[in-house]
Amino acid sequence: MALINCPACRTKISSVAKVCPSCGYSKDPEAQADPEQIKLFQRRLFRDRMYKLRMFSYVAMTITMIGALPMLWDYIKGIESAVPIVLLDHWGIYAIAVGFIMYVAIRVFMTLVRRNFRANLPDEVQRTPPIQ
Ligand SMILES: [Zn+2]
């Protein structure tokens, strides 16, 4: 079983698949996409996307720390030597600002991806009552 690119959406699909699980493209107009396969595909895509976003959010937190820790260090040293520094003048504030904005943007994006994933679930899944 080889992987080929779907001619419609460029997703890698099995060469034996009759229907692209991503976009529903088919060479055979009679063929129907298997709903189970579509569900599986979408779930995997969603998981991958969330995983990547979580990694990016860790990067953002690291950037914040790179700014915050030296800033705290210099602040403590400033107090000890009785020459307190102005925190807003410290270079660390830029790293904190960039990291924080990145983090918030990633979290917002994650919420959108999750909402989008839930909205696109097939009807039966949405109607299934929670397990008692
Ligand atoms: Zn496709």
Image: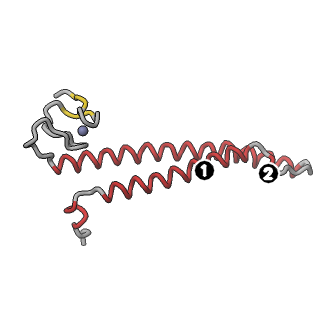
* Outermost residue to the front: 29
- Mark 2: which secondary structure? helix
Amino acid type, mark 2:
Leu
Pointers 2 and 1 in contact (CB under 8 A)?
A: no
- Rounded to the nearest whole Å, what is the CA distance between mark 2 and mark 1? 18 Å
- Report crowding for label 1: few under 14, some 14 to 19, many 20 or more residues within 10 A (C-alpha): some
Which of 12/86 is in front?
Answer: 12
Place of residue 120 in the rendered image (x, y in percent of width and height, measured from the top left) = 29, 56
User: Dividing the picture into quarters, in which one does residue 127 lie?
Assistant: bottom left
User: In the rendering, which numbered label is found on residue 87?
Assistant: 2
Looking at the image, is mark 2 or mark 1 earlier in the sequence? 2
Residue under label 1: 101
User: In the rendering, which numbered label is found on residue 61?
Assistant: none
Disc 2 versus disc 1: nearer the observer: 1
Residue occupying the point 22% across, 29% down: 3
Say above or below: 69 vs 9.
below
Amino acid type, mark 1:
Ile
- Report crowding for label 2: few under 14, some 14 to 19, many 20 or more residues within 10 A (C-alpha): few
Residue occupying the point 23% across, 48% down: 40
Place of residue 72 in the rendered image (x, y in percent of width and height, measured from the top left) = 75, 49
Asked whether mark 2 and ligand 1 are closer than 8 Å, the reply comes as no
Colouring used for the render: secondary structure
* Outermost residue to the left: 30
- Mark 1: which secondary structure? helix
Quadrant hosting ligand 1: top left
Q: Which part of the image, by quadrant, shows the N terminus?
A: top left
Horizontal side, residue 41 vs residue 56: left or right: left
Horizontal side, residue 60 vs residue 5: left or right: right
Which of 126/132 is in front?
Answer: 126
